[in-house]
Amino acid sequence: MADTPNASGEPGELYLDAAATEPVSPAVIEAMTPFLTEAYANPASVHQPGKTAARALDAARASFAAALGTRPDDVIFTSGGTESDNLAVKGIAMARMRKLGLRPVYGLDETDGKQLASSRPRIIISAIEHPAVAQSAAWLHEWFGCEVVRIPVDAQAHLDLDALERELDGEASERTTIVSTMLANNEVGTVEPVEELVRIAHAHGVPIHVDAVQAAGQIPIRFRDWDVDALSVSGHKFGTPKGLGALLVRGRTPIEPVLSGGGQERGLRSGTQNVAGAVALAIGLNESNARMQAQYRELVASRDMLIDAVLRVVPRAELTGDPVRRLPGHASFVFPGVTGEALLVDLDARGIAASSGSACAIGRHEIPATLLAMGLEPSIAKSALRMTFRRPLAREQIERVSLALEESYAGLTRR
Ligand code: PLP
């Protein structure tokens, strides 16, 4: 977190938007550089430099897999969370449609949809998915006529497990190609009960994909123990350059590639492999996991201290998401009476970089979708502000943030 005084002695920028992205760790840069300069060969080449690159790729894959509680064969390197989510949702849905003998239904309108309801392939997602999952499901609806079922969430953004059970009951489960849900929510930080979700999906014979983009490096991931079928992660959330990620997929899980080409990564992700990128993912995740282990309690304590301070200085503010089962460095609120956007701009002018909820909505200033799904009124949901950090905040930083928020809120509500 950059918080050093600037040249004029003023306190520097306080970056509280780690859920959007993190800086690249110096250890990552150091570890990946040799694979950009000296050991740059294509790992598929048969010559010695190629073999050196292939060995580095294997080592990175093994280390990365171990950090996620799985085996090297389960790792498919991709260009990030968005690609991993697309590969999982589209790839598994398409493979399962073929396996279950479900025919795509093209050019569907609403009337056709109702008539064909009992034969349409289904996809179950939650009501709070990132657009990478929600739009992949929408694409399958558009091009294959899939029925997209959204599982609602409660006021703290926990998935309604009974609703999931109900949606998987009876004949509908035979048409259900995939369940896709997040592990930790990007807007409010709530952590979902992954083992319960897996148990329910598997009891009905349906594979489950978990979007762990916000969770990896922040809370432990145990892919094999949880018995998940596919799981997405994104490197820039744990200290690698942007544009790097992975999908973990079990060998048993039916899945089709979405990219055609030379057949790298078990045929699931064609394209010359990014050896330096794989090294970065392994180093970044291990570093984040080590920090998580060493600082978890301290991080949670500072998060809770920040939450208390904010609620004290702005009594009308409310914490969003689960107060306990939430990511350790994630504090999110609504501030009735102002817009999140106005607060964000005002805080930015005071040197504090926060977010209104989802980086993807920035520039469009959409109302955070998770908050609407949690049942908040649009006018309240619009007042969302999220502060996310990977390292424990110092007491002075918490004081600085709460003072700035107190002044910002007072100023904006006076206008
Ligand atoms: N899934 C979730 C939950 C996210 O928060 C994000 C990004 O913020 C993504 C997917 C997309 O990841 P990427 O930015 O690597 O494409």
Image (cartoon, rainbow, N blue to C red):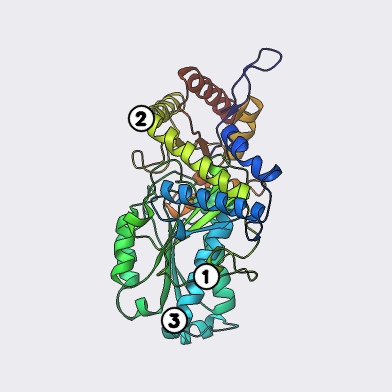
What residue is at 45 percent from the left and 44 percent from the top? 188
| Residue 297, disc | 2
- Quadrant in the rendering for residue 118: bottom left
In the foreground, 339 or 104: 104
Q: Is residue 73 above or below residue 352?
A: below
In the foreground, 127 or 53: 53
Give the residue type that dot 3 points to.
Answer: Lys
| Residue 91, disc | 1
Label 1 crowd (10 A; few <14 / some 14-19 / many >=20): many
Residue 127 appears at what percent x and percent y?
45, 59
Q: Earlier in the sequence, mark 2 or mark 3?
A: 3
- Quickly name the residue at label 3: 99
- Left or right: 6 with respect to 81? right
Badge 1 marks a residue whose secondary structure is: helix
Give the residue type that dot 2 points to.
Answer: Arg
Q: Is mark 1 within 8 Å of ligand 1?
A: no
Residue 6 appears at what percent x and percent y?
68, 18
Tell me the distance, in whole angstroms, between the alpha carbons under discs 1 and 3: 12 Å
What residue is at 33 percent from the left and 39 percent from the top? 324
Badge 3 marks a residue whose secondary structure is: helix
From the image, which quarter does the N terminus lie in? Answer: top right
Q: Is residue 363 visible?
A: yes
Give the residue type that dot 1 points to.
Answer: Gly
Residue 246 appears at what percent x and percent y?
53, 55
Q: Is residue 157 above or below residue 355?
A: below
Label 2 crowd (10 A; few <14 / some 14-19 / many >=20): few
Q: Earlier in the sequence, mark 1 or mark 3?
A: 1
Q: Is residue 208 above or below residue 350?
A: below
